[in-house]
Structures are given as structure tokens and as C-alpha cells.
Amino acid sequence: MKIAIGTENKIKISALAETVADYDFLAQARICEVKVSSGVDDQPKSLPETVRGAKNRARAAFAAAGLGIGDFGVGIEDGLMEVQDSLTGFMNIGICAIYDGDKFHLGSSAAFEYPPAAVELVKQGMDINQAFHKLELTKNPFVGSSEGAIGILTRGRWDRKTTVKQALTAALIQIENKPLY
């Protein structure tokens, strides 16, 4: 069995490897990373756009790696979603799409809210990495490839890898419990 993940982000790849190791039916899988496009904005600004990006990555990874029956393509995308009555009107959510060549299995992480100033910069066209860097919340211009914005906001209590693992685990529910779905 092969699992192709549509990213070169080492945090996402590491999260996939750690998650796969927790599942007997995936334990022998070979993981390969494939650079693919999400087909959406670098900073998705809606839940449908974020889901579309994850699905695009999963499908493209499956195809690029030449996978077949019994293999999986994985796409992971973070983005904003509108949340009525939240402080900024938006929360971040991570979406995982696992594609088996026929259908998608979706999962999400827990959602959280960015600081209002960061959301305003995102609305102006920045991605969250750029916004956090501009606001001097980090010196790392690529925070999404390390602890993530959540790592900064929680002072290390929760990091980007945990977010990715939550979304992966949620998407794997349908695969592990196939007779129920």
C-alpha cells in the first residue's frame, strides 16, 4: 500500500507518518510526498474553498504518484471559515481529504480564531504566515511549516502538527469503520 501526500510541508508529512503508525491496517504503508497545487488561494477564506483545496491536493497526489486500488492520496488544507458571532467573523480550520481513487473521506481539526489584526491582513491578501510575520508575532516567515500560528497563540500547548493529526484521524474514521459508511 502506498499513501501519497500532496505537499512538501515537513510538518504535514511528519504528522501523516505518525498517524499512520497508529493504525494496524496502514502500518506497512509507504508514504511519498508529491508537490501538487491546491487549486485555491494560498490562504483560503471559506470552508468550501478549504475543502476544495484539500480534495484537489488528495486527487492530484493520487494521480501524480500513479496510485491504484488500495492506495490513498492525502490532501491537507488550512483556511478560514465564517463563524457567526465570533470576534472576527472567521475561524481557522484544517481539512484533510483522503482519496481512495473512487471517493473522498473528509475530516477536520478543531477550529480557532486568529487575532483581529491578522484577519484584517488576510482580508487584504496576505496569508497567515505573512500576517503573523508583519504583526511581529513571529520572526519566522514560514510559521506554517513549523509550530504554526496555533503554536504561537497557545504558547506551545498546541502546534500545527497536532492540528494536522486531528484532521487526519477524523478522515480515517470512515476508512477504519468502512462497514458503517
Image: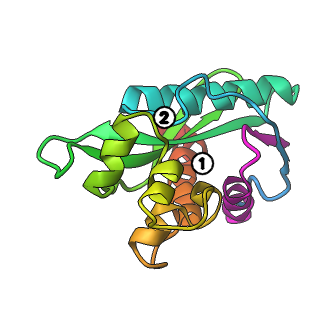
Image coordinates for residue 126, horizontal then vertical, percent: 47, 40
Res 4 → quadrant: top right
Q: Quadrant of the N terminus?
A: top right
Can you say whether 44 is above or below 16 in the image?
above
Q: Does the CB distance between marks 2 and 1 fall below 8 Å?
A: no
Question: Is residue 89 highlighted in magenta?
Answer: no
Can you say whether 122 is above or below 109 in the image?
above
Q: Is residue 43 visible?
A: yes
Image coordinates for residue 105, horizontal then vertical, percent: 55, 35
Query: Which residue is at the front of the view, 155 or 31?
Result: 155
Indicate which disc residue 176 carries.
1
Residue at position x 46%, y 55% in the image: 134
Residue at position x 54%, y 38% in the image: 179
Res 140 → quadrant: bottom right
Residue type at the position of mark 2: Tyr
Can you say whether 27 is above or below 105 in the image?
below
Q: How many marks?
A: 2
Indicate which disc residue 181 carries.
2
- Name the N-terminal-most of marks 2 and 1: 1
Query: Which residue is at the front of the view, 126 or 51?
Result: 126
Residue type at the position of mark 1: Glu
Q: Which residues are magenta?
A: 1-22
Image coordinates for residue 42, horizontal then vertical, percent: 55, 34
Query: Which residue is at the front of the view, 93 or 180?
Result: 93
Describe residue 97's horizontal placement relative to residue 27 as left or right. Answer: left
Q: What separation in Å lies between label 2 and label 1 (alpha carbons)?
A: 10 Å
Residue at position x 68%, y 59% in the image: 11
